[in-house]
Image: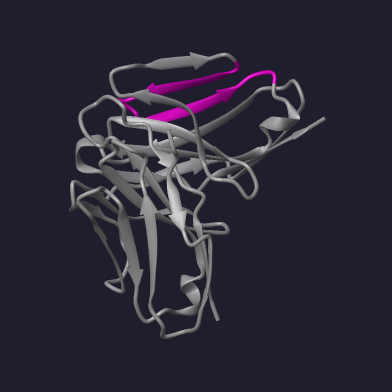
């Protein structure tokens, strides 16, 4: 079955620095790759996503890159702020099969 | 548009009992996925339903089952509860078809505690 590995499991950065989280997937049928942010006690919320026909997508301070050949995708957060502190999950999804696999999450701490 | 609604929000059950959780998706969404979240274990995929059919299932024992109704509402059932079933159960809804509108929206979850 699909396996998604997410690294690192914890990440601590100073405010203003950049943060990078990487995920690797195994199922070549995966065609949709969302990233979710989950704050303590809250539901996961989508922050950015990328489809398999796109290599990079950016939304203000957040960007995602996808390398289909290597089967890995990354989340990049620039100019981090304390409110970016949360758990971030990546996922690899086969949209027409309803199959979704999440990474184990990365706890990001941004120190003021 | 109303969001994804899960009921109940909290539940305490004893070992051996069974439990049913409910998820009402966003209006118009036909796909509902269920996940188990435990500390340090991330989001474990349970199953996904689309138009009343289970399209995919994760690696969970047969004690975990689900169904979807014609109005897209979904229920999941856990029989013969074990202490290890204590977790936050999340459902997510999406349109579920094609390559567009694939964003999934999560409910608040049901916190199940087995004692």
Q: How many marks?
A: 0
Residue closest to the eye, A50 or A27: A50
**For residue A12, above or below residue B13:** above
Residue A99 locus on image (x, y percent): 27, 45
- A61 sits left or right of A24 in the view: right
What residue is drawn where x is 44% and y is 16%?
Answer: A57
Verify whether residue B28 appears in magenta. no
Q: Extreme bottom residue here?
A: B16
Residue bounds of the magenta highlight: A61-79
What residue is drawn where x is 72% and y is 22%?
Answer: A17
- A20 sits left or right of B70 in the view: right
Q: Extreme right residue here?
A: A112
Residue closest to the eye, B5 or B19: B5
Residue A79 locus on image (x, y percent): 69, 18
Residue A60 locus on image (x, y percent): 57, 14
What residue is drawn where x is 55% and y is 81%?
Answer: B115
């Amino acid at each position: 079955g699909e396996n998604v590995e997410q690294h690192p499991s914890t990440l601590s950065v100073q405010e203003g620095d950049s943060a990078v989280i990487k995920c690797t997937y195994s199922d070549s049928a995966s065609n949709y790759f969302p990233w979710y942010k989950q704050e303590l006690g809250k539901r996961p919320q989508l922050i950015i996503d990328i489809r398999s026909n796109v290599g990079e997508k950016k939304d203000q301070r957040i960007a995602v890159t996808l390398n289909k050949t290597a089967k890995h995708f990354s989340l990049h957060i620039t100019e981090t702020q304390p409110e970016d502190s949360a758990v971030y999950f990546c996922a690899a999804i086969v949209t027409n099969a309803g199959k979704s696999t999440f990474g184990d999450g990365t706890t990001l701490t941004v120190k003021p | 548009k109303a969001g994804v609604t899960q009921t109940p929000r909290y539940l305490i059950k004893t070992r051996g009992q069974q439990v049913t959780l409910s998820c009402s998706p966003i209006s118009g969404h036909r796909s509902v996925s269920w996940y188990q979240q435990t500390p340090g274990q991330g989001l474990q995929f349970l199953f996904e339903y689309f138009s009343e059919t289970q399209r995919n299932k994760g690696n969970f024992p047969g004690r975990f089952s689900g169904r979807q109704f014609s109005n897209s509402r979904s229920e999941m059932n856990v029989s013969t509860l074990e202490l290890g079933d204590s977790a936050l159960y999340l459902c997510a809804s999406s349109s579920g078809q094609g390559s567009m509108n694939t964003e999934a929206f999560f409910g608040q979850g049901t916190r199940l505690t087995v004692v």
